[in-house]
Amino acid sequence: ANFHREVLESKQLVLVEFWAPWCRPCLEMTPAIEQIAQEFSGRAKVGRLRIDDNQELSSTFDVQSPPAVIVFRDGQVIKRR
């Protein structure tokens, strides 16, 4: 519900993991995503977006399957993996 404000309007760099609870690699990445969030606290935002609950956003950013990690700057995708 807050994707537009928290990601697209953010003045900070934002890393978003598009994930699903049935995705084993997503679950295995959770500790790494949490560590990144701690390391970059105050300098960048880190969030997770559950693709099952946000199919429209997943489609907008061409997320074919999880996990997908996308980095945004000034509302634009600058890196994806």
Image: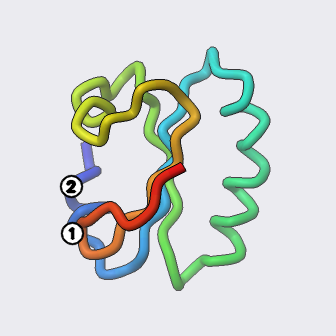
Where 29 sits versus 77, above or below?
above
Where 58 sits versus 4, above or below?
above
Question: Disc 1 versus disc 2: distance between alpha carbons?
Answer: 6 Å
Residue 34 place in picture, x, y as percent = 70, 56
Residue 57 place in picture, x, y as percent = 26, 36
Residue 11 place in picture, x, y as percent = 30, 81
Foreground: 48 or 70?
Answer: 70
Q: Is residue 68 left or right of residue 51?
A: right
| Secondary structure of residue under mark 1 | loop
Which image quarter is the N terminus in? Answer: top left
Residue at 55% x, 24% y is 20
Q: Dot 1 surroundings within 10 Å: few (below 14), some, or many (20 or more)?
A: some
Counting residues from the start of the chain, the first of labels 1 and 2 encountered is 2
Residue for badge 2: 4
Question: In the image, what residue type sits under mark 2?
Answer: His
| Secondary structure of residue under mark 2 | helix
Q: Which mark is residue 71?
A: none
Residue at 71% x, 76% y is 39
Residue for badge 1: 9
Q: Is residue 49 left or right of residue 57?
A: right
Q: Is residue 10 left or right of residue 36?
A: left
Q: Dot 2 surroundings within 10 Å: few (below 14), some, or many (20 or more)?
A: few
Residue 23 place in picture, x, y as percent = 64, 21
Instruction: State if disc 2 and disc 1 touch (CB < 8 Å).
Output: yes
